[in-house]
Image: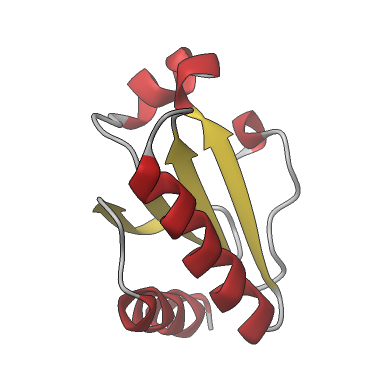
Amino acid sequence: MAELGARLGERATLVQFSSAFCQPCRATRRILAEVGALVPGVAHIEIDAEEHLSLVRALGIVRTPTVLVLDATGTVVRRAAGMPRKADVIAALGAAVREAV
Protein backbone atom coordinates (compact mmCIF):
# COMPACT_ATOMS: atom_id res chain seq x y z
CA MET A 1 0.00 0.00 0.00
CA ALA A 2 2.33 2.69 -1.30
CA GLU A 3 -0.19 5.46 -0.55
CA LEU A 4 0.69 5.22 3.14
CA GLY A 5 4.03 6.93 2.65
CA ALA A 6 5.83 4.65 5.11
CA ARG A 7 7.39 1.21 5.15
CA LEU A 8 5.20 -1.71 6.07
CA GLY A 9 6.10 -3.97 8.95
CA GLU A 10 7.89 -7.20 8.16
CA ARG A 11 5.03 -9.28 9.62
CA ALA A 12 2.11 -6.84 9.87
CA THR A 13 1.24 -3.14 9.98
CA LEU A 14 -1.19 -1.20 12.18
CA VAL A 15 -2.51 1.80 10.24
CA GLN A 16 -4.29 4.42 12.33
CA PHE A 17 -6.36 7.21 10.80
CA SER A 18 -6.54 10.14 13.22
CA SER A 19 -7.60 13.75 13.38
CA ALA A 20 -6.02 16.62 15.30
CA PHE A 21 -8.60 17.13 18.04
CA CYS A 22 -9.60 13.50 18.52
CA GLN A 23 -9.05 12.45 22.14
CA PRO A 24 -9.61 8.71 21.47
CA CYS A 25 -6.96 8.99 18.72
CA ARG A 26 -4.32 9.83 21.33
CA ALA A 27 -5.22 6.80 23.44
CA THR A 28 -5.29 4.62 20.32
CA ARG A 29 -1.81 5.87 19.38
CA ARG A 30 -0.50 4.73 22.79
CA ILE A 31 -2.19 1.32 22.53
CA LEU A 32 -0.90 0.64 19.02
CA ALA A 33 2.62 1.79 19.91
CA GLU A 34 2.63 -0.56 22.91
CA VAL A 35 1.43 -3.50 20.83
CA GLY A 36 3.90 -2.70 18.06
CA ALA A 37 6.72 -2.72 20.61
CA LEU A 38 5.55 -6.09 21.97
CA VAL A 39 5.31 -7.92 18.65
CA PRO A 40 8.47 -8.14 16.52
CA GLY A 41 8.07 -7.16 12.86
CA VAL A 42 4.98 -4.98 13.42
CA ALA A 43 4.93 -1.34 12.29
CA HIS A 44 2.53 1.38 13.44
CA ILE A 45 1.69 4.10 10.93
CA GLU A 46 -0.48 7.06 11.91
CA ILE A 47 -2.17 9.04 9.15
CA ASP A 48 -3.80 12.45 9.58
CA ALA A 49 -7.21 11.89 7.97
CA GLU A 50 -7.69 15.59 7.19
CA GLU A 51 -4.41 15.77 5.25
CA HIS A 52 -5.06 12.58 3.25
CA LEU A 53 -8.68 12.92 2.16
CA SER A 54 -8.24 10.99 -1.09
CA LEU A 55 -6.88 7.98 0.82
CA VAL A 56 -9.65 8.33 3.43
CA ARG A 57 -12.27 8.28 0.67
CA ALA A 58 -10.62 5.40 -1.19
CA LEU A 59 -10.60 3.27 1.97
CA GLY A 60 -14.07 4.33 3.16
CA ILE A 61 -12.87 5.81 6.46
CA VAL A 62 -15.84 7.57 8.09
CA ARG A 63 -14.61 8.30 11.62
CA THR A 64 -11.47 8.62 13.66
CA PRO A 65 -9.81 6.72 15.01
CA THR A 66 -10.05 3.92 12.49
CA VAL A 67 -7.45 1.17 12.59
CA LEU A 68 -6.57 -1.10 9.69
CA VAL A 69 -4.50 -4.23 10.25
CA LEU A 70 -2.43 -5.11 7.20
CA ASP A 71 -0.69 -8.42 6.66
CA ALA A 72 2.93 -8.63 5.45
CA THR A 73 1.84 -8.01 1.84
CA GLY A 74 -0.12 -4.85 2.70
CA THR A 75 -3.57 -6.42 2.39
CA VAL A 76 -6.20 -5.19 4.84
CA VAL A 77 -7.18 -8.19 6.97
CA ARG A 78 -8.99 -6.42 9.84
CA ARG A 79 -10.64 -3.04 10.33
CA ALA A 80 -12.09 -1.31 13.39
CA ALA A 81 -13.52 2.14 14.08
CA GLY A 82 -13.26 3.70 17.51
CA MET A 83 -10.67 3.17 20.21
CA PRO A 84 -9.63 -0.49 20.27
CA ARG A 85 -8.84 -2.57 23.33
CA LYS A 86 -5.24 -3.75 23.54
CA ALA A 87 -6.34 -7.41 23.68
CA ASP A 88 -8.37 -6.98 20.48
CA VAL A 89 -5.40 -5.46 18.66
CA ILE A 90 -3.17 -8.35 19.74
CA ALA A 91 -5.80 -10.86 18.58
CA ALA A 92 -6.18 -9.11 15.21
CA LEU A 93 -2.42 -9.11 14.75
CA GLY A 94 -2.28 -12.79 15.57
CA ALA A 95 -4.87 -13.48 12.91
CA ALA A 96 -3.03 -11.31 10.35
CA VAL A 97 0.26 -13.08 10.97
CA ARG A 98 -1.36 -16.54 10.78
CA GLU A 99 -3.16 -15.67 7.52
CA ALA A 100 0.13 -14.57 5.95
CA VAL A 101 1.83 -17.91 6.71
Quarter where residue 30 is shown: bottom right
* Image point (31%, 73%), residue name: 85
Closer to the camera in the image, 72 or 36 = 36
Tell me the colour scheme of the image: secondary structure
Q: Residue at x 34, y 19 (%)?
A: 57
Q: Residue at x 26, y 33 (%)?
A: 63
Give 78 or 89, whichever is nearer the viewer. Answer: 89
Quarter-of-image position of residue 5: top right
Q: Can residue 71 be seen from the camera position used here? A: no
| Badge count | 0
Query: Left or right: 83 with respect to 31?
Result: left
Q: Residue at x 69, y 63 (%)?
A: 9
Instruction: Reply above or below: 96 against 87.
Output: above
Query: In the depicted view, which residue is nearer to us: 85 or 55?
Result: 85
- Image coordinates of residue 22 in percent, x first then y, are 38, 36
Residue 57 in sight: yes
Q: Is residue 65 left or right of residue 48?
A: left
**Which image quadrant for residue 3?**
top right
- Viewport quadrant of the N terminus: top right
The location of residue 65, given as percent across then percent down, is 35, 43
Residue 47 percent across, percent down from the top left: 56, 35
